[in-house]
Image (spheres, rainbow, N blue to C red):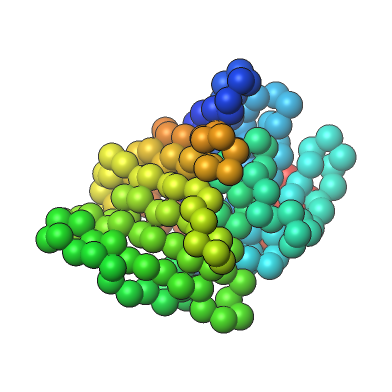
Amino acid sequence: YFEYEALIKVPEKADRILKLAVWMKNEWRLSEFLAPADVKGTKVLILSPTQMYIYLPAYKKVRRIASHVTDQGFMGMNFTQDDMSITNYPKMYSATIAKDDGKLMTLNLTAKADTHAPYPKMEMVIDKSKNVPTEVRLFNESGTKLKTETRTNYTTEKDQPSPTELKMVDHTKGGASTTLTRKAWKVNPDIPDSKFTKRALEEGS
């Protein structure tokens, strides 16, 4: 369980701040927006890369997110539903070592067939001392870099490392960025499976 503050920066626009809570279990992810008022109560449930739902409090309805829009930023963030759906890299990608200087190791990740991996290619930089990713570069099929995600200031709780800050820069949008700053987290809280259902979304629980 995490609570984040999201700072959205878009060239020539005013900065925007969102607050959200995120619950994760297995490969499921539930995000609830807490602020500001115009998005409060909106929830996004990701059960798999092809099964995502959104609850809109203004309509009191749950809608399935169409697959053709999962690669678009939601709530103005530069993190997309697809970005959020990657919970198991080895399941979606095969990896080869591109570089290793003793401190940092760079992996080339190639999407496996039939996994609905959102990006065909990635580069992941691993801090070997902590065995955690510090940078993830996202590419399209032709090798153009679309986005860069950095993960910094890791802290550890119950042997689980987690970055205090995640920043996604979108190179296709003039360097627009979203920075998620972790405000609170709990490792392995006892979250019932029922929380990750359409019914729970509809009931607002």
Residue at the bottom extreme, as displayed? 113
Among the 4 quarters of the image, the one containing residue 104 = bottom left
Among the 4 quarters of the image, the one containing residue 194 = bottom right
| Residue 152 relative to residue 16: left or right | left
| Residue 52 relative to residue 22: left or right | right
Residue at the left extreme, as displayed? 102
- Give the tally of numbered discs: 0
The answer to whether any part of residue 33 appears in the image is yes
Q: Nearer the viewer, residue 162 or 90?
A: 90
Residue located at (50% from left, 48% from top)? 147
Could you say where residue 15 lies in the image, as x and y percent from the top left? 57, 21
Could you say where residue 175 lies in the image, as x and y percent from the top left? 52, 35
Residue located at (70% from left, 59% from top)? 52
Residue located at (60% from left, 38% from top)? 173
The answer to whether any part of residue 191 appears in the image is no
Residue located at (73% from left, 26% from top)? 38
Q: Indicate whether 11 appears above or below 71.
A: above
Could you say where residue 26 lies in the image, as x and y percent from the top left? 50, 66
Could you say where residue 96 lies in the image, as x and y percent from the top left? 33, 74
Q: Indicate whether 2 appears above or below 51.
A: above
